[in-house]
Amino acid sequence: MSEHVCPLEYRYGRQEMESIFTESSRIRYQMRVEAALAQAHAALGEIPQADADEISRVAESDLVKLERIKEIEKLTNHDLMAMVKAMTEQCKGDAGKYVHLGATSNDIVDTATALQIRDALDLVAEDVDRFLLTLAKLAKRERDTLEIGRTHAQFAIPITYGFKIAGYIAELLRYRERINEIYPRAIAGKMAGAVGTGAALGPNFLKLQTIVMQNLEITYEPAATQVVGRDRYTELVCLMATLGTSLERYATEVRNLQRSEIGEVSEYFDAAHQVGSSTMAQKRNPINSENVCGLARILRGFVLPTFESQVLWHERDLSNSSAERFTLPHVFTLIDYMIVKMDKVFSGLDVHRDKMLRNIASAHGLIMAEPVMMALVGKGIGRQDAHEIVREASMVAEDKEIDLLETLWERDDVKKLISREELENVMDPANYTGGSKEIVDRMVAAVENALETEVE
């Protein structure tokens, strides 16, 4: 058994996604395209149906061995032609002479890649839906959980934790739309020959291409060169990288809120067995969220070579080929793993409501400056005057380390406008979450509508 070099092979990837991009799988996808090509030729009366059926039989069997393909490739120095020869060897009768008839390598490679992309996107779409359901359940559960909103990493005004999660839901629903929209653009094959004219495929080339793609249930490049337009891959990889960046955003928030001095949420920790540090035995670290943040950086790293692979000489050169053997499998394996990892984090997230309330209390009322200002405006004074009154009182409260309520109540210009009871009510954080709860309800309902299921 050989050792692995890439961490995706032994640490990070999921078998469900990796199985789409293994070497053996790639060959099976390519043989499936060869079979579809043969069937299209037969449908147009260009080769015997029995021979097309024989090619399909070989493509769908385990007769073509990876080891044999590699033996042939050592002689031919051409991986696709090695596969074609290996298929030909296994065909009975005259069927072998019709394998790959009229096609160029990238007719097979790009079309097989489209099939891989389709299956990979299906997995990503399932991941997103599962994660959306997890977030909707969390948002609903924490709909009323008071928390301090923060801007510039400083206390701002009250929100609910469910409201924070509702923002993630809105973002992921947009990704759900984007993924659905990209299917026909990203999943396109070609059967158009050496430079896209289909000359070797004969006078029925356009019909043949349509039949092949209908058989495979994908679209095709309407005006190809030797390859499918790489703008399709660029859009796809950019979408996956953008999705990964959003996952990093959620993970970063978990990491920040798990800081010892904040402590409002934390990743699940198996206290009976899990080890946080090899030397600091007390540690409980947000390792899953940190993991996602690190992988997001790697994921974005595949954007640049994808852009560069879009620029090919004339009707095609080979500079994209080696790069794409890395980019697409790694991008899909990473994004799948990252979504599943974040779903795990939020499924088991510990929300420390008591610490959220303690943090609110530690603000000594300063987070309620805005509602006081608005209440004073409601009493008839100008907005700028109200702002200055509250600003001055806030500076005194912070300097003396006392509650804002007390410094406000020391001012005659406040006392003449509002009673202490009314001021206390205005400064109750629970009374100043705006539309947070309604927004949570709306986003939970949006998930229920999108997934056609009830969020419990």
Image: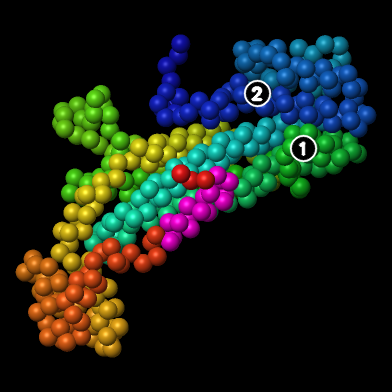
* Vertical arrangement, residue 58 with respect to residue 189, above or below: above
Question: Which residue lies most toward the front here?
Answer: 421
In magenta, the rendered stretch is 438-453
Question: In the image, which is nearer the foreground, mark 1 or mark 2?
Answer: 1
The structure residue drawn at horizontal position 76% and vertical position 48%, both measured from the top left corner, is: 223
Residue 95 at x, y percent in the picture: 84, 17
Q: Is residue 350 visible?
A: yes
The answer to whether residue 449 is magenta is yes
**SS of the residue at dot 2?**
helix
Question: Which residue lies most toward the left here?
Answer: 400
Q: Amino acid at mark 1?
A: Met
The answer to whether residue 88 is magenta is no
How many numbered discs, if any?
2
Residue 176 at x, y percent in the picture: 55, 48
**SS of the residue at dot 1?**
helix
Residue density around tag 1, few if under 14, some if 14–19, many if 20 or more, within 10 Å: many
* Vertical arrangement, residue 5 with respect to residue 186, above or below: above
Residue 348 appears left or right of 187: left
The structure residue drawn at horizontal position 68% and vertical position 19%, both measured from the top left corner, is: 82
The residue beneath circle 2 is 27
Residue 437 appears left or right of 350: right
The structure residue drawn at horizontal position 85% and vertical position 42%, both measured from the top left corner, is: 206
Q: Amino acid at mark 2?
A: Ile
Between 443 and 384, the one lying in front of the other is 443
Q: What whole-number distance in Å separates the C-alpha atoms at marks 1 and 2?
A: 18 Å
Is the image coloured rainbow, by chain, by secondary structure, or in one colour? rainbow
Between 328 and 13, the one lying in front of the other is 13
Residue 57 at x, y percent in the picture: 78, 17
Residue 166 at x, y percent in the picture: 42, 54
Q: Magenta segment, principal secondary structure?
A: helix
The residue beneath circle 1 is 213
* Vertical arrangement, residue 178 with respect to residue 205, above or below: below
